Image (tube, helix red, strand yellow):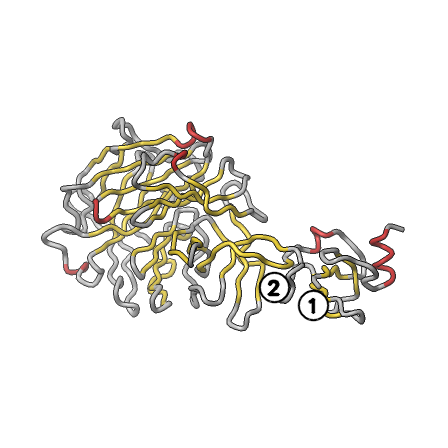
Amino acid sequence: MTALTELISAGGGGGALIGEYVGFADQGASFTDANGAVWLRAGSGTLDTTTYPDAPTVTLPVSYNSFFQSTAEFGSYSNSGLNISGDWAIGTSTQNRYGQINLATNTVNASNVQLTSIASNAEIAAIGYITCTGPNVVSAQANTDNKFGVVLRDWNGPVRMQSFALDGYNDSSSIGSGALNQDATGSYTYLYNSSGGQIRLDTSYSFGGIYWDAPNHKLYGVISDLTQGSLHVWDFTGDTFGTSNSVGPSTKSATTTIDYFAESTVTNVYSLSGSSTDLYIGYSTNPLSTIKIRKIPLSGNLSWASGTDVEDYGKEGSSAHNPRGQLVIEDSQGDITINGTVYTNQAFYGMDGSDHTFLSGAPYLYQWKSGEVLGSTTTTQVGPASGVTFYQRIK
């Protein structure tokens, strides 16, 4: 018999060291044995590194109970990005729908609202807010904090930016309008790369995100199609937004296009968010690799080399077009759930001291940052056994 099976047969911890796994009859999430050793069941976990300073930890995305955690469903998962503007967040869900939530009041005012006027097979590559600048902003925008929504879409043609109304932007009791607005120009802008060429989403799974730099009237966009990722910058200085919900000119070429795949073999760019000083790009170097978030300063040349990775989290049960990572959720009592999900629709939410925090998740949204977790290993990761439950000694 091996040392491990001898311990299992004995039904006790024997001389197990802190961090080792032993099989017992099920005794709940944790227990203390007759010798005073503390055991944590595989699949359970704790954030209490003070009580158990010698126990091994794993770094995972953690939503602490002091962080924002939505109390209502925001929408199903999406690879089409999440966007934050002030106290509001917006994101797309499946089948050309979007959700919107007031972060200040923790109130969902639009959940899985259908975006009409978009063909069912159209690709939604990104969603976000943009600032109204027109002198004749229509009455539907009077309650929107001077913003309306836009999506980047493609349907057998180049990427276009199209607008939709946010009737309930500042009114949590009102439901946002899903109707894409049409004016004399069709209320969309075709977006081209810096060479004036088309940007197309011709594969079944396309990803991206947009970030609106309101003070400088610049739109940043990242787009990929499982083969390569790129960044585009469109300068809308002098263009009018808001009249009849129009997004401005009929066409716009990027002032800057950077091929991140050529720089660093980045195949997928899943999300884009930002602050007044930096862009945050969720990415991977191949469809099945670990998801990372890279911080790129706006003050530089926007090259991949100018940035640094600020997050790196693994994926469990993922596929190329449905990447996600494990999320630890702490409730108001300090108990944790380890089987939450961090999808790739993350957006930078702010700093917690020196740590970056992000907003992500589905169908609920969670603010999170990397934290040290005791436990979290699943039974299948430890190994099979009949009639026993694996526990890890943590003290």
Of 265 and 127, nearer the camera is: 265
Say which residue label 2 marks: 46
Q: Looking at the image, do the residues carrying marks 1 and 2 touch, with CB atoms under 8 Å apart?
A: yes
Of 243 and 42, nearer the camera is: 42
Give x and y (percent) for residue 82. 38, 51
Say which residue label 1 marks: 30
- Element marked by disc 2: strand
Say above or below: 63 vs 253: below
Of 320 and 53, nearer the camera is: 53
Say above or below: 198 vs 247: above
Q: Quadrant of the C terminus?
A: bottom right
Of 303 and 252, nearer the camera is: 303
Q: Quadrant of residue 76?
A: bottom left
Mark 1, Cα crowd under 10 Å, few <14 / some 14-19 / many 20+, is some
Q: Quadrant of residue 68?
A: bottom left
Give x and y (percent) for residue 304. 40, 35
Give x and y (percent) for residue 94. 42, 51
Q: Earlier in the sequence, mark 1 or mark 2?
A: 1
Give x and y (percent) for residue 209. 36, 44
Residue in the picture at 28% in, 27% down: 197
Q: Position of 41 compared to 59: left or right?
A: right
- Element marked by disc 1: strand
Q: Is residue 27 visible?
A: yes
Q: Farthest right residue?
A: 1
Residue in the picture at 72% in, 70% down: 31
Give the amino acid at mark 2: Thr
Say above or below: 385 vs 238: below
User: In 3D space, how far apart are the residues under numbered discs 1 and 2 (Cα atoms)?
Assistant: 10 Å
Give the amino acid at mark 1: Ser
Q: Position of 16 compared to 168: left or right?
A: right
Q: Position of 80 compared to 236: left or right?
A: right
